Image (cartoon, grey):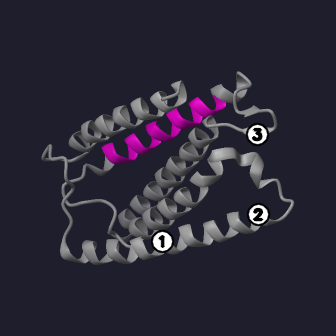
Amino acid sequence: MTNASWAWAIGIVVGIILVIILLRALNRDGAVKTKYDERQLVVRGKAYKVGFYSALAACGVMMFLCTGNFGAEKLGYSGYFIPILAGVVGQVSYCIFKDGYVGLNTNMTRFILIMALIGAFNLFLGIFAAVRGELIVNKTIQGPFINLLCGIMFVIIFAELVVKKAIDAREE
């Protein structure tokens, strides 16, 4: 196993542990599992379909870019993450605006703050790598580009949550 493989494995394990800790902190009852009512579960099911088709469309675009002279090979393995990101953003965006994202036991203010912090941290990591010259090596985008993409995704989620919270407050 190479050093990069070990780094990925350790990063995934640490990420899973952090997710469990964050989930306990985000839910008012300290549970790891978020609770949803029946309507929210239906919305989440439809959102997974939206996420699937978003990922499928992104895969099609990436496949098209790889067949031509568009420079998709310069994305390196980060290019495989773009359809994943598209699927997640599609699913989460649908859930947020159809009231299926935030559970019954979720502390909304804390949740929005965590999304902003995760986004800022990932953007920092990506920008830090760019400043150190590690973002592009031999004209190929490297792994820290995924941090930039994740940062952008969490900023999008943060903005959508703030907008949705404002819409809900206005309706009340």
Residue where numbered disc 2 is placed: 65
Q: Is residue 120 left or right of residue 108?
A: right
Q: Is residue 91 left or right of residue 131?
A: left
Magenta stretch, residue numbers = 110-127
Please state the horizontal and vertical placement of residue 100, each as a whole percent of the image: 32, 68
Tell me the SS state at disc 2: helix
Residue 52 bears which disc, if any? 1
Q: CA distance from mark 3 to mark 1?
A: 28 Å
> On the image, which quarter does residue 17 sit in?
top left
Residue where numbered disc 3 is placed: 140
Q: How busy is the neighbourhood of tag 3: few (under 14 within 10 Å), some, or many (20 plus)?
A: some
In front here: 167 or 81?
81
Q: Is residue 110 above or below residue 11?
A: below
The majority secondary structure of the magenta stretch comes to: helix
Please state the horizontal and vertical placement of residue 94, each as a whole percent of the image: 44, 70
Q: Is residue 60 left or right of residue 165?
A: right
Badge nearest the viewer, 3 or 1: 3
The amino acid on which the numbered mark 1 sits, given as a three-letter code, is Phe
